[in-house]
Amino acid sequence: MAQLIRRAAALNKSLPAASFAARGLATASTSPITVETSLPFTGHNIDPPSRSVETSPQELLTFFRDMALMRRMEIAADSLYKAKLIRGFCHLYDGQEAVCVGMEAAINRKDCIITAYRDHCIFLGRGGTLLEAFAELMGRKDGCSKGKGGSMHFYKKEGGFYGGHGIVGAQVPLGCGLAFAQKYSKDESVTFAMYGDGAANQGQLFEALNMAALWDLPAILVCENNHYGMGTAEWRAAKSPAYYKRGDYVPGLKVDGMDALAVKQACKFAKEHALKNGPIILEMDTYRYHGHSMSDPGSTYRTRDEISGVRQERDPIERIRKLVLAHDLATEKELKDTEKEVRKEVDEAIAQAKESPMPDPSELFSNVYAKGLGTEHKTGTLQITYNYLLLALKDLVAFFLVVFIRSRQKRSENCTSMSENINNDSTCQDPFVD
Amino acid sequence: MEASFGVSSAAAANAVNSPALSPPSLPFIRSEARPISWRVDKSRKAGKITTKAVAAQAENPASAASKPGHEVLLFEALREGLEEEMERDPRVCIFGEDVGHYGGSYKVSKGLADKYGDLRVLDTPIAENSFTGMAVGAAMTGLRPVVEGMNMGFLLLAFNQISDNCGMLHYTSGGQFTIPTVIRGPGGVGRQLGAEHSQRLESYFQSIPGIQMVACSTPYNAKGLMKAAIRSENPVVLFEHVLLYNLKERIPDEEYVVSLEEAEMVRPGEHVTILTYSRMRYHVMQAAKTLVNKGYDPEVIDIRSLKPFDLYTIGNSIKKTHKVLIVEECMRTGGIGASLTAAINENFNDYLDAPIVCLSSQDVPTPYAGTLEEWTVVQPGQIVTAVEQLCR
C-alpha cells in the first residue's frame, strides 16, 4: 500500500512534463498531440513501446466524457443498490475506468473483449446504452439480457462484448476460444481476455495461455491488477505478484492502468504483437475505490488513507482533466458542464429504466434452449392448481351427493332428523351412522 | 398371464441378434416430438434424407447379399457422421486429446486431421477445463466445435464450463448467444477399467439447464445422433459407451439424421415396458430372449434422449402395458432412472398397475476385480427376475 502512494507521488511529479507537437495548440480538434505517459512501461521478454503517445484533443475530451459517464453510472448504481433497486451482487468499476476507455481507443468493434463480473463500464465502452445497463441491473425487461442475467452477465454481441462472467477465471479459456475463432476465420482481429489479480492464480488461465501460445492465437490477456482479490491483498495470494511475468515464455507488459493514454498505447502495441506473434499479457496497475462488491465495505483490508491517497494522486479522470486544462482544450467550466450533462444523462436513463416493466412470466422458460425446443415444466403451478381444483370439485360433488341421498332417504322413509332418531330404535337407518 | 406373442418369435429372435445387429423390421411407434433438429436447410441439397428413427429395411434372409447400405462398426459410424458434417459445414471443428495425429483414442476421428488440417481437428493438451471453455468461446462466435472427452469421466474437470457456460450462456445473455457445441466421449462401465474410468456422467449433468443429452447405442443411431447433435443450435452431450464401439450394423448409404428428442422402439410388446439406454439395451435384449421363451412379451424402448425424456413414446407404451421396468447403468442414487421414475409417476400415475421398478448399478465406485465389477452393473438374469415379479 505504501508502494502505491510512493508510486503516486512519483507520478505527480512527472505529470506537467507534457510535450507539444510541432503543430502547436489544437485548433482543429483531431490534430495530434503527443503526451508522455506518466510511467515507463516495463517489459517481460519484450521491448516495451515508447512512452510518447499520440492523441488528439477530440480523443482527450472523449476520454474525459466517457470516463465521467462511467464514474457517474457506477456511483448511481451504488445509490440504487442501497435503495434496494439493485439486488444480489454488484461489482463497481470506479477507479478503473482508464483501462476500459484506453482499450477502446486502440481497437475496433471486430476485436472481442471478454471480462469477469466487473463489467458495467466495459459494456458501455462496447456500445451498450445506459438504459440497457440500468434496466439489467434492476432486472427489467429492457435490460441487455432481458433482465435474466443481472450485474454479472452483461453482453453485447454486435459490439463484440462477450460478457460478463460470474465464475472467477472461467472467462479466460472462453477468451482464448474467441481468439481461436478469429484465427480460424482469419479476420485479423484480436481478443482481449480480461481478468483480475485474484483470477491470475487460476489454473485454467495457464492452461489457456499454454494453448494460446502453442497455436499462436491472437489473444491478449489483460490482468486488471487492483491489488486485492476481494479481501485478500495480492502479496497474500500470489507468490509472485508480478502478473505480467507469469506467462514465462509469453511476453508481458506492465502498464499504469490509471493512465488512459498508457493503456491505449499498450493495447495498440499488444494488438500488433498478437496478430503477428501470438499471445501477450498486459498487467494494468489499477485501483478500485469501492469494495469488491456492494456487500464489501472495502475498508477492512485497506486503510481509508490509501484509498483517498490513490484518489488524489492517481485518479484517471483528474489526470485527463489536468491534461485538457494544460493543453487549453477546454475551460474548467466546460468540463464541469460536461460532468453535469453526464449526470443528467445518467439520471434520465435511471428514470427510464425504472419505468421499464419486469420481464413477462413466460420469459422464465424462454432462451433455455435455442428456438425449437420448448421447456415447459409439465407439472408446473398451473397443473398443480388444476389438480387441486379437480380434487376440490370431487369433494364438492361427493358432499352434494350425500346430502341429496340423505334427503331422499328421509323423504321416502318418512324419517325425522338424525338427532331425533339417534337414541330411538327406528325403522329408518341413517346410512352414515355406525 | 397367457403366453401371447405380440410378435413372431422369429422377428423377436432377429431383434436380439448380437453382436451383429440386424435392423428390426417391425413397425414402431413414433413420437410426435417437435421435429426440429433434423429439418435440413433445403438450399443445401445434401442428398435424400431418411427421417425415420430406425432403419426400416425389409428383412429378407434370401437377399442378404444384395442388401442396401454398408456395414460399419459403431466408431466408424460416428466418424462418418463427423466427416459428413465437417464436409457440409466449414464451421465444424473438433477439439480433444489425441484426436488429430493419433486419430482418436477410439479411432472416431481417424484420418480427419489429414483431410481437414490441424486447426479443424485440434490436438489439445491435457487441459479439459480450458479446452472445453475454448470450445464454448469459439461457439459464441459461430463456430461449431465438437469436444471429445477421451473418457467422459475426465470432463468432470470441465464441469463448470459445461454447466455455467455451455448450458447457461444462452439464457443469461438474454438469447444473444447460442452455444452449438457437441460434447461427446465414451463413458460407462467397461472391462475392469477401474473406478475413475468407469463413470456415468449423465447422472451428474442431467440437472444442467440448457443442455440436451443423448445416448447412442447402435451404429445407426450413433451416426444419426452425431449429425443431429452437430446441427443443433443447443449444446448437446452425446454419451457413447466404451464397450459398444465395435458393434457392427448395416446402415443406409444415403444421408440421414435422427431426432435428438425421440426414443427408439426396439421391440414392441404387450406385457411390460422396459426403458433402457446405451449398453444396458443389450442386457435387456438378452433378457428379452429368455423372457420370450418363458412366455412374456416385453416392450423394449431405448430412450436415447436422456434430457429431455421422450415422454410421448414412453407414455404411449405405459398406457398399453401399465407396467414399467427401468434398466440403467447409472448408480441408484440420482441417476437417470431416478429422474425417469419421478417423471413417469408424475405424468402417468393413473396408468400404472404396479410401482415402477428401476434396476440400476450399485452405489459404489466400480471395482477392478472382474467378478465384483459384474455385480456392480445390472445383469440379464436380474432383468428377467424383475419382469417376472412385475408381471406376476
Image: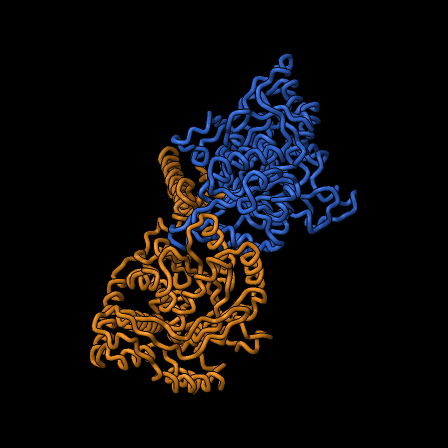
Indicate whether A191 appears above or below B70: below
Residue at 50% x, 31% y is B257
Indicate whether A101 appears above or below A387: below
Provide the letter of the chain coloured blue: B
Total numbered circles: 0
On the picture, is A306 further left or further right than B354?
left
From the top left corner, tell me how far across and down residue A224 is, in percent.
Answer: 46, 70
| Residue B327 found in image quarter | top right
Of B331 and A323, nearer the camera is A323
Indicate whether A282 appears above or below A375: below
Of A11 and A199, nearer the camera is A11
The reply to whether residue B353 is in sight is no
Of A416 and A298, nearer the camera is A298
From the top left corner, tell me how far across and down residue A204 is, in percent.
Answer: 56, 61
Provide the letter of the chain coloured orange: A
| Residue B214 found in image quarter | top right
What is the image's colouring?
Answer: by chain
Residue at 53% x, 76% y is A234
Residue at 38% x, 39% y is A397
Indicate whether A55 appears above or below B208: below
Of A25 and A171, nearer the camera is A25
From the top left corner, tell me how far across and down residue B192 is, in percent.
Answer: 75, 45
